[in-house]
Image: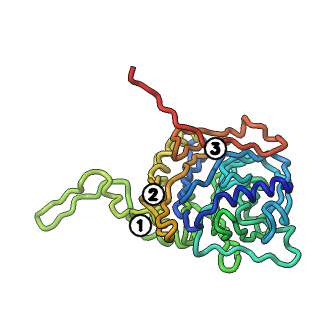
Amino acid sequence: MNQTLSRTIIAMLTCFALPIASSNACTSLVVSAGDGGFVYGRTMEFGANLGSNLIVIPRNFSITATAPGEPVGTGGKTWKTKYAATGTNFFNIPLLCEGINEKGLTGGLFYFPNFAEFQPLPKGGAERSIGNIELVTYVLTNFATTDEIKQGLPKVIVTGIAVAALQNQVPPMHYSFHDAAGKSVVVEYTDGGMLNVYDNPTTVLTNSPPFPEHLNTLSQFQQITQYALPPMQIGDLMLPSMGTGSGSNALPGGYTPPSRFVQAFFKRNFAPEPATSAEAVPLVFHFMNNFDIPPGLVGEVTGATNPFSYETTEWTSAVDMKNLRYHIHTFGNSAVRFVDLNEVDLNADKIRTIKLDQESSYTNLSK
């Protein structure tokens, strides 16, 4: 990035100062389709406006990562993008928080408090380093498959970058990626910066705790079924189940990450397979709408000057990994919009930004 762009990013980040503990409720999953395609769905929750827009990063575009203590976009590894990618950014900066590339590789970052620990920067290691906020952009512009992620990430140093918008704290993150062949991985840096790349047959990810602990939680719900339970017999008394859905009585409720992980797994696991990935897109939106958080339901006390901060679902995405379409709707506008990588200029000379802040429109059917 050039100096002018770096100064612009710093100014943008400074304008969005807010408590780092405000984001903790994102949920994601992948649905398969009969045509061999896959659709990734995700909700984004945050305690203040992320300022997200759609961006398109072209091929052969030069990006410089951030080294610890350096201005944003300076001091780290420089690379030319191998693949074009599109998706959402955050705080109006030209980095992906989630997206899809032209090979169908899809993924994003998720808040990961209390466990994320990124790698220390060794002497002379800056040219191999990228910031934790840049990892999704790095992966989607360099790799085509999850196998390439496994091979490529050990070759770079991923450091924690303090962000002015988050009160100069390092945002704790882990990452979920899915390729066009149906393979999924979770990437976590923990325990002093140890890189863990887990195969993820569930395709689901939420937030803390680490991925293996989510699997341990999931194993406690093997009795869940989509079918009604048989009647309960007590002596001569027969008590029928109260309608359909009784097989899901033991599903955890609430908005905690482990609860949402279990709910998301069974939703996608029990769903009938759509014939095509295009048909899977509305199904995925219906799944993800189950995880919407309305304002005021989830929040925290943050201090005298800001006594209560609540999370809400800012946007929801459904990404067609076969047809290379990134679909999204926002809290303020439920109309679905999309970017099709087959229709945009993948060889542009700069990053394109597409505004998401658009007014809702309503169709009058009165006459």
Number of residues whose C-alpha sits closer than 10 Å to that of mark 1, classed few (under 14), some (14–19) or many (20 or more): some
Q: Is residue 232 visible?
A: yes
What residue is at 80 percent from the left and 57 percent from the top?
Answer: 6
Q: Residue at x 48, y 57 (%)?
A: 264
Residue position for label 2: 266
Q: Which residue is mark 1?
A: 221
Residue farthest to the front, as pictured: 305
Labels 1 and 2 touching (C-beta < 8 A) = yes
Amino acid type, callout 3: Tyr
- Graded by Cα atoms within 10 Å as few (under 14), some (14 to 19) or many (20 or more), the crowding at tag 3 reads many
Viewer-side label of 2, 3: 3
Cα separation, mark 2 vs mark 3, equals: 24 Å
Helix or strand or loop: what does disc 2 sit on?
Answer: helix
Viewer-side label of 1, 3 = 3
**Residue 208 rendering spot, x and y as whole percentages:** 55, 69
Q: Is mark 1 in CB contact (under 8 Å) with mark 3?
A: no
- Quadrant location of the C terminus in the rendered image: top left
The tag earlier along the polypeptide, 1 or 2, is: 1
Instruction: Return the x and y of residue 168 as percentages of the image width and height.
Output: 68, 69
